[in-house]
Every structure is written in structure tokens, then in C-alpha cells.
Image: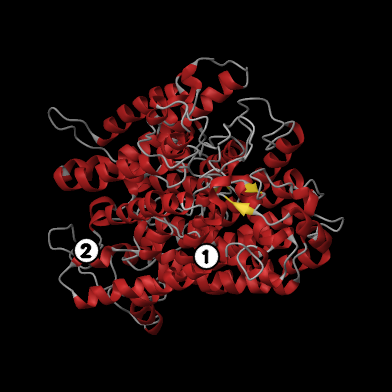
Amino acid sequence: MVFPQHEQEGTSTPLITTHQASSSRPSTADDENSPVEQVALTVPTSDDPTLPVVTFRMWVLGTASCALLSFLNQFFWYRKEPLSVTSVSAQIAVVPLGHLMARTLTERVFFKGRPYEFTLNPGPFNVKEHVLITIFANSGGWGVYSINVVTAVRIFYGKEISFFVSLLVVVTSQVLGFGWAGMFRKYLVEPAAMWWPQNLVQVSLFRVLHEKEERRKGGTTKNQFFFIAFICSFAYYTFPGYLFPMLTSLSWICWIFPHSVVVHQLGSGLHGLGIGAIGLDWSTISAYLRSPLASPWFATANVAAGFMIMTYVITPIMYWLNVYKAKRFPIFSDGLFMSSGQKYNISSIINSNFHLDVQAYEREGPLYLSTFFAITYGFIFASLTATISHVALFHGREIWEMSKFAFRKEKMDVHTRLIRVYKQVPQWWFQCILLVTISFTIFACEHYNDQLQLPWWGVLLACALAVVFTLPMGIITATTNQTPNLNVITEYIMGYLYPGRPVANMCFRVYGYTSMRRAVIFLQDLKLGHYMKIPPRTMFMAQVVGTVIAALVDLGTAWWLMDTIPNICNRALLPENSPWTCPSDHVFYDGSVVWGLIGPRRIFGDLGTYTAINWFFLFGAIAPLLVWMAHKAFPNQHWISLVHMPILLGATANIPPATAVNYTSWIICGFLSGFVVYRYRHNWWQRHNYVLSAALDSGLAFMGVMLYVFLELENVSLKWWGNNLDGCRLATCPTAKDIVVEGCPVY
């Protein structure tokens, strides 16, 4: 089915940027190419407005891709090593199907001569259809974070929450993000300086799949290179995925000292600090930080600096000085502990109303965290204030200029000029979505307060926080490919205002932070459509429909798994080596206990153990100011301006559930790609870097699905020493005297 594309001149919105395009970059006669070199080298500077976009095959392949990716990602989300099947997989898989439909479907025109005439086959399968299918798929490629609320309530707390109430939470939190994206698209999509590095991987792949290229003598085309790399990635994943799982984390130091707790704590890539640990597995490398090949080198360097300071300086000092009784617990763990070193029995401090039983908590004693977990919270505190301070100091003037000249015609790059020929999406569409969604959210929280616990004012406060933080979070993601983890600010605020109610805290987190995070994903897709010249109103339609499909499929899949897999997420009752350990859901649950049930006052406040960690808020606010002052004092030292405090301080925000080996492996790959190859083999990097990233993602995803379907479902497995993922069995042991933990030596 194909619908006519209407075109007109849109209202003008300026592009305010201090960057200038290099004369060596591609340009056109009338307008300026992108001032960002990577974009100028990757994104095409032409458009064909006559290509059909909203076609029958787009609907079929788009909705199918969205539903399939939603199912797969939610299915794998609960597993020990969660496999993320990205939209890149769908981007490749639909190409032969699109061409097959173009060859076999009838070309008959239905209702010919009438305003609503259409055909099932408007001609060859084209790149714009392909982009829109990928946008659909991307709605299912990120998972639905708010399902963690449902998992925590049903599995960890053992309480009731209905499917209808769960659906309301999932849908409204997703659609809220779309509303915030619409509010800030003028700031985060149209300006050339907001270049969204991750999109260049997909743009490169689109060009590989649709553009014809002459093969140079003795070389390969990009298409040939992609399929060679894809086959290698596909074949290689049989080793870490099935034959030799130890490749996920080679913690070789533990092999040398098999009976030393301290060495295992230092060397374990999965349960310790990961010194010397390396993962020869692309899923290990890209699991939590996304592809290192898409990360700009300065961002990779900031992540590396933050990780090393946190992991190899602060954590060992805190642990071996026994700060906060650190030696009684593992050095690295997402668990919640009693002062005796045993796991905290959370059910013993919950009353019949699903609130904190204060007397029981005082009887059981205070809750403790592992050293790494506690310090991670401190660094997240610092990254919160650093984000606001950094954006105000380094981007405040540009934001003001973009607001000041919002309705004047200013010079724009070629991509913004080309997209302006299409009808733009009126701002009131997004405003209506926000108004309706907020109304439904308030209704759900008030009418089903016994299940959700969140009052109406909590919804409005969460929306206010989202408005404040979406812009700075979007700017950082659009320029560094790293998204600050700001979820703690929502938990912290609600934990003080409404303590003792874990579900209320989780819902506030979902509406305050998850809607922001979802907005960033929507904005990234809008920029992809901007680069590929997809009509904005068509993008709007695809994102709305894709969001609803993904929410329904994700929740249905999660509900089915929770009903059919015995003891899912319960590590104590699951069989040995069971994959259904739910690492991310455990961290989400821990957060609901720390911030919602017990509350920040009893942990980080005047009644708690970790009061001093609040000083990180002040440090985070000051750190970007110090960088900014140094930059002003030494303007010729360009490296100073590349010190990005929100990224540096928030580098370890994904730990846990991410582990040290995820970071060490990612940093090594990022260094080789972003520094070594980019500097010394720039032509190779220009032709192959993003294509290689797409091929590695795709090969891994397809082989991962095949291994599960053909081997795991049939319980076909190998049992040998290569199945030992880490080899550091003592890494989770304490080192304090007289602390008894099963399976650990007593000091």
C-alpha cells in the first residue's frame, strides 16, 4: 500500500553552531555540509522526494520486525548474559524480503483515479522504505524498561499487580518519552552539531545495502566487506556462545593463584575488579556500552579515565581501609547485606500494607552495600550535578541562541535544508500527546493506588524532572554517544518525599527517568530520519505505532515467562547454571529497596551509614567549572575542552549489572578503533569502521538466536572446564576476620 507524499516549505528553524565546515569536506554549491567530519564523510547529501515511503511492504515488514525484536529482547533480558538483538539485525534481514515482495506482489492499482488509490507494489524496494522499517524495528530493539516494575512486584516482592495496570504503566511511560522528544527536537535534531554518532553505523549500512560500488583492483566493496565480516562474526560466536563460554571473561590471574581470595577479587572480570581480564566476545564488549566502534575517541577516553579511577584507585583504597565495614562483604556485588556479611532478608521488613516495617528494620539492623556498589552511587550523584553544570557552561550560549532565533531563517546544513521540503509535524501534536498521556497516568495512579502507590502529585513532579533533564541528557548523548545515568535523582527525591513505599518509588523512577531515556531514543531515531530524508509526519506515525506494538509484545512476553519458568530470577532456587538469573532486574529491585522501601534517609541521610557520599553532589557541580576555567585560562590547550566530566564521573553508572570485563574489553576496542586506526589508517577507518560495527552486531545476533533455538531449547550442552565463565570462584568472598559465608574460607 502506498500513499502520496505531500511536500511544502516548512517553517524555518535555525541551525546555530560555532563549527565551520572544512574546505576539504564534501560540499554543495548552495549550502554547507555538516561541520562534523564523521557525518560529512558518511551521510549522503542528496535526496529523492519521489521515492514511495508508506507502502504495504513497509507496514508488513515494519510491524513484523518490531514485534519480533520486542519478543526476542524481552526474552533474552532475563538471562545471565542478556543478548541484545538490535535493529541492525532487522535492517539486514528485511532486505531480501523487501526485494522478494517487490518481485512477486501485484502491481495493480486499486481505486484508480480516486484520492485514496493505492498499490501493493509501487516499484523496487527502496532505501526510504528500508529506513522506516528500521525505525519500526528500533522501537522493539531497546526493550521496555518499565517492565522492571512488574518483575520486581511479582517476582521479588511476591505481590499482586494486574495485567491491565501493568499495561497502563508500560504504555504511558513509553508515550511520555515521545512527548518529551517532540518538545526538544529543535534543539537536538535539527542542529548539525547534534550529530548522534550511533546513527552513522546504520547510515553506513544503508549505503552498503543500497548503493552500487565499483570494486577496486585487489580490494573489496563495502558490501563485500560487510558480508565477510558478518560471516566471521556469525561463525565465531559459536565459541563464546556455546563451545567455549570462558571466552566471555578470561580472568587469567585467578588461574595462577586458585586459592587466594584477594587475587580473585582483583582479577575476576565478572565478580571483581577485572585486572588483566579480557573478553574475546563481541557480546561482552558491546553489551552495556554499545559498540565501541561508534564512540568518539574523546568519549572513550573519558569513560576509560572514570572507570580506572573508580575501579583501580578509589575502590581498593576504600575496601582495604575497611570503610563502611567493607571487608565483611564482596568487593563487587549487587547484593544487599547485613552487618554479619549475610544477605539481607528483605521480606522480613515489609508489613502487610507493602510498606516498610520500621520496628522490624531496627530489629534486623542497617542495610549495607558492597564497596563498589556504594561508591558507584556516589559517582552517579556527582554525574547528576556535573551534567547540569557542564551543559550550562559549555552549551548554555548555544541553547540560548537556538531559543532566541527559533523563528528566524538562519544558515543551515544540507540535511536540514533537504528535510524542510516535507510537511513538518506541528508542535501541538506532541503537546496533545503529552496532555492525554499525563491525564491517563494520573488516572492510573489514583484509581489503582493500592497497586502503584504513586500519588497524583508524584506524576506531575516526575514530569517536571523529565522536562529539566531531557535537554542536557540529549546534548551529551548526541555529541558523545554516551547517555548519563540520571535515574538516581528520581529515586532519591521520591525516597525522601514518600519513603517506605517501594512501588511508588519505582513508578516515579519510570515516569521521571525512563521517559527521559526513551525520549533520547526517539530523538536518535528522528535524527536518523533527518539524515535519510524521511518525511517528518511519516516518522511520527512510525514511532507512535512502533511504540504501542513494542509495549504490548514486551509485556506479553514478560508475563508469559514469569508464569511459565519456575523460580525465574530466584538465584537461590534455580538449578545450577540456569540462564534465568535476571541481572538487570536484580539491580532494579535493589534500587527499589534502597530508595523506596528503606529510603535514602536511612541509608544516605542522617539516619544512615553512607551519609558522607552526599558530598559527591558538590564535587560533581564543581568539577565542570574547574575544566571550564582551565579551558579559558589555557585556550591553546585543546585537550582540556575534551575532558567531559559528566561522562567521566558517570562512566561506571552501568556497573552493576555490567561488570569490569565489559569495560576493559570495550575500552581496548575503542582505543584501537577511535585512536589507532582513525589516526594511522584513516582511509580504512572511513570506509570500513561503521560497516564493521554493523557486521559484528548482526553476526552475533543471528548466531545467538540460532544457538538458543536449536541447542538450548533442546537442552543440548557441553560440560567441560571451558564452560567456567570466570574461574574466580572466591571473588565473592569477604576478607574480614570471623565472617562465615558458605563456600568461602574463614579468615
* CB-based contact (under 8 Å), mark 2 and mark 1: no
The answer to whether residue 405 of the structure is visible from this angle is: yes
Indicate whether 198 appears above or below 383.
Answer: above
Q: Residue 613, labelled with which disc? A: 1
- Give the mark toward the camera: 2 or 1: 1
Asked whether residue 548 appears in the rendered view, the answer is no
Q: Is residue 184 left or right of residue 641?
A: right
Please say if 578 is above or below 65. above
Q: Residue 120: x percent and y percent?
A: 53, 41
Task: Say which element carries label 2.
Answer: helix
Q: Residue furthest bottom?
A: 404
As displayed, is residue 3 above or below residue 584? below
Q: Nearer the viewer, residue 668 or 212?
A: 668
What residue is pinned by disc 2? 639
Element type where label 1 sits in the image:
helix
Circle 2 Cα neighbour tier, 10 Å, few/some/many (<14 / 14–19 / ≥20) = few
Give the left or right position of residue 163, taking residue 219 as reference.
right
Q: Is residue 626 left or right of residue 721?
A: left
Distance in Å between CA atoms under marks 2 and 1: 30 Å
Q: Earlier in the sequence, mark 2 or mark 1?
A: 1
Dot 1: few (<14), some (14–19), or many (≥20) neighbours within 10 Å?
A: some
Residue type at mark 2?
A: Trp
At label 1, which amino acid type do we have?
Ile
Residue 565 percent location from the top left of the image: 72, 31
Q: How is the image coloured?
A: secondary structure
Give residue 169's quadrant in the image. Answer: bottom right
> Residue 475: percent from the left, percent from the top?
40, 66
Q: Quadrant of residue 505?
A: bottom right
The tally of labels here is 2
